[in-house]
Amino acid sequence: MANLTLVYGLRLLPSDELEEVGSATIKLKTGRDAHVTMHTLEGSKDEIERQLRTSLAAFFDIYPEI
């Protein structure tokens, strides 16, 4: 299996300041663009950590061949 790269970004903001989240664009060596869907999690620090762990585990469940 080839080496993989996981692309992600994190930023904490006060929840009442967030208006809109768009997709992130990645430039590939082929000259093409790829897009990453951005996700939001809200709650206390503990709730966000729990949701993030659950989301990450579910992400890898999508790719059982890895």
Image (cartoon, grey):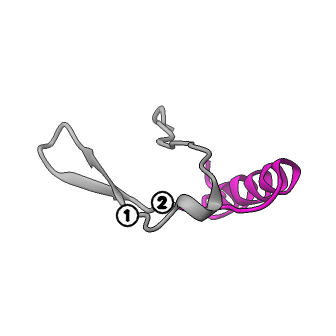
Q: Residue at x 85, y 57 (%)?
A: 47
Would residue 46 be counted in the magenta stretch?
yes
Looking at the image, which is closer to me, 62 or 18? 18
- Name the residue at the front extreme: 16
**Which amino acid is tagged 1?**
Gly
Residue at 28% x, 55% y: name it.
Answer: 34
Image x and y of residue 35, in percent? 32, 58
Q: Which residues are magenta?
A: 39-66
On screen, residue 34 versus residue 55, left or right, reads left
Q: Which residue is mark 2?
A: 38
Q: Is the Cβ of the residue at disc 2 closer than 8 Å to that at disc 1?
A: yes
Residue 42, by quadrant, is bottom right
* 42 or 65, nearer to the observer: 42
Residue appearing at x 51%, y 42% in the figure:
9
Residue 14: image location, x then y, percent: 63, 53
Q: Mark 1 or mark 2, which is nearer the start of the sequence?
A: 1
Left or right, residue 47 beside residue 42? right
Task: Name the disc covering residue 48, or none.
Answer: none
Rendered location of residue 48, percent (x, y): 77, 54
The residue at the point 46 percent across, 35 percent down is 2
Residue sitting farthest toward the top: 3
Which residue is at the front of the view, 56 or 44?
A: 44
- Residue 52, above or below 27: below
Which residue is the extreme one toward the left?
31
- For mark 1, what is the residue? 22
Q: Is residue 20 left or right of residue 47?
A: left
Q: Magenta stretch: dominant SS? A: helix
Q: Position of residue 33 (x, y in %)?
A: 20, 52
Compute the Cα span from label 2 to label 1: 7 Å
Amino acid type indicated by mark 2: Met
Neighbour class for label 2 at 10 Å: few (<14), some, many (≥20)? few
